[in-house]
Image (tube, grey):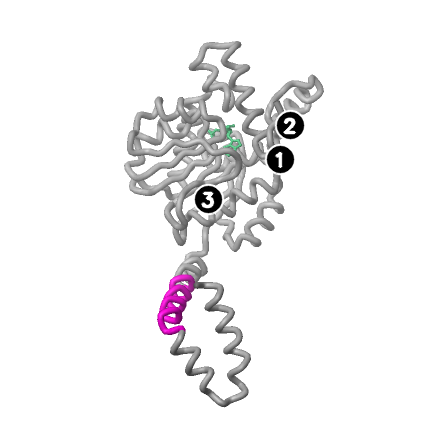
């Protein structure tokens, strides 16, 4: 069966999970689906420590994109009393995570492609662990746009990525698998310059970018880590500008007839152009 291109990735991931289920016990397959099952607990703990290191507080709202089978969410549930929203493209992994974590107040949901189904400015932190390593540049950038949208002013985005300099062994493994035509998700390496350009265009600040071994020296994390933050002043201004514009529109709509009449009764030639613009605006917002 052929799938629309944007659902192709979901299909490919789901197929790998199905394959793993056929070759190993269910619990192991759910863990192996997102990486090395033997290190499931250890990596989960490392991810919690990274988020805490970068400022995650117990009462924060965290959004995790690519939550998989709950590797992070499980140990995090002992720390985070605030909200958690986890999203992934594989329905079965999301169900497994939900069942493992046992936090009825937390949200676990599947998405089809690139989406953070949360309102604007609701979260303190958005994280992507080993997710951009499986997306094309334009997809990662799209996710960063989404992350910036849902973050509160001053919120942070934490994501991990692979770079050739320090993850050459990983690259060699992928090269060997490619030569054996093995079916697996795409793996993408990103360099720091690309991330800097993304941040610049998204008006985000690069707070930190470093090898995983330098974030947690005693328990080296296997990928590099980048932290971006929203510019609170610019974001607050945008929110305020929207509110101000909306307030103007509301008043103007109520007073529409009076405003047009006042303009039309004016004899000044300077009024004609703004009047036409105003009429166009009223048409648009009505
Ligand atoms: C290597 S796993 C990492 C899981 C988890 N972040 C962790 O580190 O414990 C990558 C996860 O990203 C998910 N994923 C891939 N593409 C995605 C997308 N477009 N949106 C959401 N999740 C995605 C996969 O299904 C998988 O569960």
Q: Nearer the viewer, residue 176 or 217?
A: 176
Residue at mark 1 to residue at mark 2: CA–CA distance = 9 Å
> Disc 2, ligand 1: is the CB inside 8 Å?
no
Quarter of the image where one finds residue 165: top right
Instruction: Look at the numbered disc 2 and give the secondary structure of its residue.
Output: helix
* Quadrant of the image containing the N terminus: top right
Q: Is residue 258 left or right of residue 186?
A: left
Of callouts 3 and 1, which one flags the residue occurring earlier in the amino acid sequence? Answer: 3
Of callouts 1 and 2, which one flags the residue occurring earlier in the amino acid sequence? Answer: 2
> Disc 3, ligand 1: is the CB inside 8 Å?
no
Residue at mark 3 to residue at mark 1: CA–CA distance = 19 Å
Count the marks. Answer: 3
Q: Residue 117 carries which label?
A: none
Q: Nearer the viewer, residue 91 or 28?
A: 91
Look at the image and give the residue range highlighted in magenta: 241-256
User: Which residue is the site of mark 3?
Assistant: 157
* Quadrant of the image containing the C terminus: bottom left
User: Which residue is the site of mark 2?
Assistant: 171
Q: Is disc 1 in contact with disc 2, using a CB cutoff of under 8 Å?
A: yes
User: Which residue is the site of mark 1?
Assistant: 189
Q: What residue is drawn where x is 49% and y is 30%? A: 89
Residue 160 screen position, x and y as percent: 52, 36
The residue sitting at the bottom extreme is 267
Question: Which is closer to the viewer, label 3 or label 2?
Answer: 3
Q: What residue is drawn where x is 45% and y is 49%? A: 149
Crowd band around label 2 with a 10 angstrom C-alpha radius: few (<14), some (14–19), many (20+): some
Queried whether the magenta region covers residue 242, the answer comes back as yes
Crowd band around label 3 with a 10 angstrom C-alpha radius: few (<14), some (14–19), many (20+): many
Q: In this view, does 21 lie above or below 149?
A: above
Crowd band around label 1 with a 10 angstrom C-alpha radius: few (<14), some (14–19), many (20+): some
Q: In this view, does 62 lie above or below 199?
A: above
């Amino acid at each position: 069966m052929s799938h629309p291109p944007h659902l192709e990735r979901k299909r490919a991931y789901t197929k790998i999970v199905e394959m793993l289920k056929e070759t190993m016990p269910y619990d192991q397959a759910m863990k192996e689906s997102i990486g090395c099952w033997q290190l499931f607990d250890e990596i989960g703990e490392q991810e919690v420590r990274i988020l805490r290191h970068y400022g995650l507080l117990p009462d924060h709202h965290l959004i995790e994109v690519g939550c998989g089978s709950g590797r992070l969410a499980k140990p995090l549930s002992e720390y985070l009393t605030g909200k958690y929203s986890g999203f992934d493209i594989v329905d079965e992994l999301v169900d497994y995570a939900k069942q493992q974590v046992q936090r009825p107040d937390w949200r676990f949901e599947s998405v089809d492609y690139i989406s953070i189904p949360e309102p604007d400015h609701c979260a303190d932190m958005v994280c992507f662990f080993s997710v951009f390593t499986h997306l094309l540049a334009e997809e990662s950038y799209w996710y960063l746009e989404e992350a910036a949208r849902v973050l509160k002013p001053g919120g942070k985005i934490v994501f991990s990525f692979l770079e050739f300099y320090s993850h050459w062994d990983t690259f060699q493994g992928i090269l060997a698998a490619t030569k054996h035509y093995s079916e697996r998700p795409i793996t993408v390496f990103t360099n720091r310059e690309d991330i800097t350009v993304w941040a610049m265009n998204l008006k985000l600040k690069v707070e930190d970018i470093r090898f995983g071994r330098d974030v947690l020296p005693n328990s080296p994390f296997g990928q590099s880590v980048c932290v971006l933050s929203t510019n609170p002043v610019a974001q607050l201004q945008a929110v305020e500008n929207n509110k101000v514009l909306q307030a103007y529109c509301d008043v103007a709509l109520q007073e529409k007839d009076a405003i047009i009449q006042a303009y039309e009764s004016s004899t000044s030639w300077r009024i004609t152009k703004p009047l036409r613009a105003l009429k166009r605006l009223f048409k648009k917002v009505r």
